[in-house]
Image (spheres, rainbow, N blue to C red):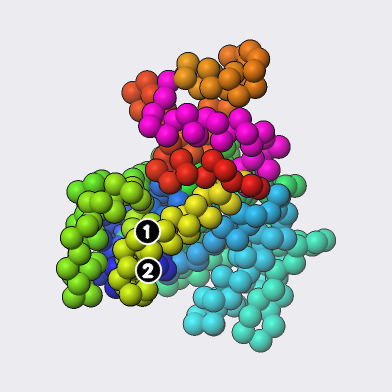
Amino acid sequence: MLFDPRPKDNLKDLFDRESEISLLKNSLDSPLIIIIGLRRTGKTSLIKSVLNYTKSTYIFLDMRRFENKEYIVYKDFIKSLEREINEITRKNKDLLSYLRHIQGVQVMGFSVSFSWGEEKVEISDVFSELNDWASEKGKTMHIVIDEAQELIKLRGYNILPSIAYAYDNLKNLSFIVTGSEVRVRDKFLKLEDENSPLFGRAHVEINLLPFSKETSVRFLEEGFKEQGISFPDSEKIFDILGGNPGWLTYFGYIYIKHGRDEEKAILETKRYAKRLLSREFCNFTKEGGRDKRRYLKVIETCRKGCSWKDIKNSLEALEGREINDGTVSDIINNLLEYSFLVKEDRKYMITDKLLGEIINVRC
Ligand SMILES: Nc1ncnc2c1ncn2[C@@H]1O[C@H](COP(=O)(O)OP(=O)(O)O)[C@@H](O)[C@H]1O
Ligand SMILES: [Mg+2]
């Protein structure tokens, strides 16, 4: 069902995205695939649908679980790896005999436990055994790190060397890394930083954009048609909510569930979207000890597009004093890195129409 609000995990429920689907399918043996797209544009849906369709073996590390944390430690990461590996060993008991050799791994019955204190398990050892197991089976094991920008908060441990080691040596492993924020590329993977373990590694990149107006309208019509409903206002809904697949899906879901009351469904969807966007915005300001009022001012100013000068002027009006150019640029760069803002031609735009409606948020 197109309006199912959960991530899709079956290709037949995935609307549009033909070129992204074929790019991903054709790249599945690449060592590193990066999928970048705003939250709720369908990254998780794309990956799960394609990996299930191709009957691939994969580990899915959902880093979103850390989004409210100020920082993460080794234990947090290793425990999520442990949980996912146990999902696989349940169906593939022979994997246990590979894992039991590793320092810091305990096998109890049919599950493994990874230690994180002294004698901690090394991630590269785990990757190495997963690779041997996959190689023995003649398959590729995909390691999905979903919403990987959260790992920028990992303290006291760097997982990049393990990924680089796997990239160079473990031919039966393939990494799929997603990010909702462009900083996943330069602040987490650091592919263009000469001092980074992953420097210069070739990779496939897939960018997932929100739906265009035309696609959004088709999506809504198709979703309603599936339910035997003819819905005449798809264009209006796009004009109000924008083309984020997550918001459109939620709208369709609520509309059908709550007695086909359009106004109510719009309100509900806005409330839902604003709650999520506010939470992300508040995490962003908290994480960097950033001044909320300044950032909200910029979002407000750029609702319909703005120039650098517009931003400077609005910040100066807010504070009633001059603000130096460096500070203005820092604020803009932070918003760009966290994908609240994009630069198109010489203008800045908010990336989600409904972000423009959170300007009264309390964090
Ligand atoms: N191409 C698509 N077709 C159908 N539904 C989609 C599509 N893309 C996203 N969705 C829906 O939008 C919501 C967000 O998708 P999700 O895959 O969780 O996005 P992300 O991982 O980018 O945050 C889910 O309800 C999902 O079902
Ligand atoms: Mg996701």
Q: Is the magenta stretch mostly helix, strand or loop?
A: helix
Judge depth for marks 2 and 1 and give the one in front.
1
Which element is circle 1 on? helix
- Residue 334 is situated, as x and y percent measured from the top left of the image, at 56, 32
Q: Is residue 49 left or right of residue 32?
A: left
Determine whether the residue tagged by mark 2 lies in a helix, strand or loop.
helix
Q: Quadrant of residue 249?
A: bottom left
Q: Residue at x 50, y 34 (%)?
A: 299
Instruction: Report the residue marked by disc 1.
Output: 266
Relative to 291, residue 284 above or below: below
Whether 305 is among the magenta residues is: yes
- As rendered, which of 198 and 263 lies closer to the eye? 263
The magenta stretch spans which residues? 283-308
As shown in the figure, which amino acid type bears the numbered disc 2? Ile
| Quadrant position of ligand 1 | bottom left
Quarter of the N terminus within the rendering? bottom left
Q: Which amino acid does label 1 sit on?
A: Ile
Q: Residue 20 carries which label?
A: none
Q: Nearer the viewer, residue 122 or 320?
A: 320
* Residue lying at the far right of the rendered structure: 118
* Rendered residue at 54%/62% (across/down): 61
Magenta stretch contains residue 281: no
Mark 2 C-beta to ligand 1 under 8 Å: no
The residue wearing badge 2 is 254
Residue 122 location in percent, x, y?
A: 68, 58
Residue 281 occupies which quadrant of the picture?
top right
Q: Is mark 1 within 8 Å of ligand 1?
A: no
| Residue plotted at (50% across, 70% down) | 133
Q: Can residue 92 be seen in this view?
A: yes
